[in-house]
Image (cartoon, grey):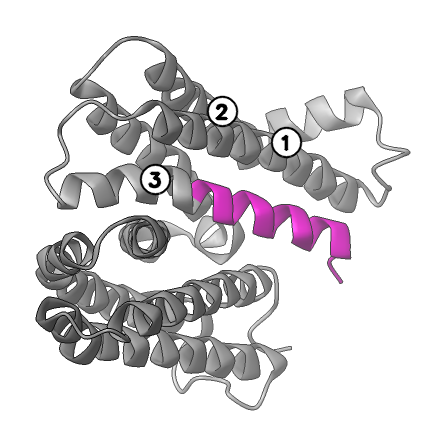
Amino acid sequence: METASLLVARFVAFVALLLVAGLPFHALTLGAFAPMSRPKRLVLALLALMAAGASIWWALETVAAMAGATLATLDQETFTVVLAATPLGAVMEWRLTALAAVLLAMIVPLRALRCGIAAVAGAVALGTMAWTGHAGASEGSIGTLHRAADVVHLLAAATWLGALAGFTVAAFSKGDRGIAQELAAFARTGSVIVALLLLTGVVNTIAIAGWPLPFGSRWGWLLALKLALFAGMLGLAAINRWKITPGLERGEATAKGHLQRSLAIEFALGLGVVAVVGLLGVLDPAA
């Protein structure tokens, strides 16, 4: 049984990595190739530091669980040996290097190149999640397909979560026309994201649990919860696209308030999906 601290560390690292990759991805989908503002650079730098700190915490908790120890009793020699003997060492090396690149991109005067470099480095850092959990344990050609699908799934999820974060902030800081234009510009990208999430989600689920799916197990119930939260996000996204955004464009007085609440709830549901995925990643589907 995973400890609560390990699950919390995994969740915090997961959310931070998704936003580190998702925020610059979202900016690029809107064609934002202009230099990033100082507040945005600060937020991304802090998220990169949070992702690095939470990843180190997660690695320590993981090694302690492998060694049958607690974080307080884990010694440096055991930690170093386990890192060298398992894929965890390579995962941490790639992830921390990529996060350092994101941090440097926020500091070095790269101007228009900054967002692209941050997106690539953030994608690499997030992609290392595919070499942990069930995907990391898969072997052979099935394992390669599983990890490839997982990387695409992660990047699509990151772009959606990053877009939600960006739109939520914009809904409270921009005028009706500005946020309506951004939502309309993202509509096609959003459709592609949903298609990728559905396709890769099916591949990943079957690779982990086989067919038929074990909905009677605890893993199966969590999968059903994830699907319910995902459906809720889809429903809110549809309302935003087909009802609230046209209302903003028409200048309806209540539209912006509805959008603010809808985006906040959709983002909260997204965090719920991440929490459930974190649990699914450490549980046996047959348990």
Quickly name the residue at label 2: 96
* Span of residues in magenta: 1-17
Q: What residue type is labelled 2?
A: Leu
Whether the residues at callouts 1 and 3 have beta carbons within 8 Å, the answer is: no
Q: Indicate yes or no whether the magenta region holds residue 175.
A: no
The quarter holding residue 219 reads bottom right
For marks 3 and 2, the one nearer the N-term is: 3
Q: Image quarter for residue 238?
A: bottom left
Q: What element carries label 3?
A: helix
**Residue at the bottom extreme of this rendering:** 216
Q: How crowded is mark 3: few (under 14 residues within 10 Å), some or many (20 or more)?
A: many
Image x and y of residue 102, in percent: 37, 23
Check disc 3 and report the residue beneath it.
Answer: 21
| Front-lying residue, 211 or 18 | 18
Question: How far, Cα to Cα, is label 1 from label 2?
Answer: 9 Å
Whether residue 36 is situated above or below residue 188 in the rendered picture: above
Q: Where 136 sits versus 257, above or below?
A: above
Task: List the residue tagged with mark 1.
Answer: 56
Q: Tally the numbered discs.
A: 3
- Amino acid at pointer 1: Ile
Is residue 227 visible to us here? yes
